[in-house]
Amino acid sequence: MQAGKREELLATAERLFYEEGFHATGIDRVVAEAGVARMTLYNHFPSKEALIEEVLDRRFRRYLVELQDAIDHRGATPAITALVDCHCNWLRSASSEGCIVIKAIAEFEHHSAGIARQGRRLKQEMLGLIRDALALDNRPADAATAERLLLTMEGANTLAPVLGPDRAADHLRTMLPGLLDTCSAESV
């Protein structure tokens, strides 16, 4: 399959899995909307689980690249602020219905340990990026601080479909200074 067709297949699968769920979206629907034959899909992905793993990894890599780029090009803005601002922009542009990785963990915890394990690994990578951003700002970069920030960011992800991505992002930005102050005070 041409690179363009593979990309179309992955983009279609990502959209459908995100909007409708992994179990609710069948392979027949993915191949029909992507305009490829079922056998073509299986020539590149030996199973639906392999397709899901590739979709999750591809989307999460895009997200991490955007976060890292925001940190790298932040100018005088603190790294953690740049990271949270980028996350808020991601909520608005690509994640208004929640986090696809958390959705995958929830859907596959008891059905495909590999996908659930992949989701947890991706979130551990996110914790590492948060710790790196904290360290760049000369803030405590301990596990508890990174976990609290991730918990707050994931809360915004989870409530974006309820509150709307703009309000969830605004609340996250408003809460960030207090959370950082609390974490800094506890580490002294």
Image: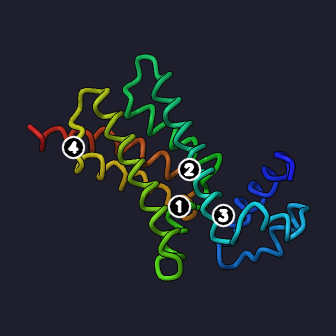
Question: Could you tell which of marks 3 and 4 lies nearer the N-terminus?
Answer: 3
Q: Amino acid at mark 3?
A: Tyr
* Vertical relation: 122 (above or below) 81: below
Give the structural element (helix, strand or loop) at label 3: helix
Q: Which residue is mark 3?
A: 18
Q: Residue at x 64, y 65 (%)?
A: 52
Question: Could you tell which of marks 1 and 2 lies nearer the N-terminus?
Answer: 2
Disc 2: CA contacts within 10 A as few (<14), some (14-19) or many (>=20): many
Give the structural element (helix, strand or loop) at label 4: loop
Give the structural element (helix, strand or loop) at label 2: helix
Disc 1: CA contacts within 10 A as few (<14), some (14-19) or many (>=20): many
Q: Which residue is mark 4?
A: 142
Measured in 3D between alpha carbons, the distance from the residue under mark 3 to the one under mark 4, in whole angstroms, is: 32 Å
Q: How many marks?
A: 4
Disc 3: CA contacts within 10 A as few (<14), some (14-19) or many (>=20): many
Question: Could you tell which of marks 4 and 2 lies nearer the N-terminus?
Answer: 2
Q: Residue furthest top?
A: 76
Q: Which residue is mark 1?
A: 101
**Camera-nearest residue between 48 and 183:** 48
- Give the numbered dot on residue 60: 2
Residue 175 left/right relative to 142 = right
Measured in 3D between alpha carbons, the distance from the residue under mark 1 to the one under mark 3, in whole angstroms, is: 9 Å
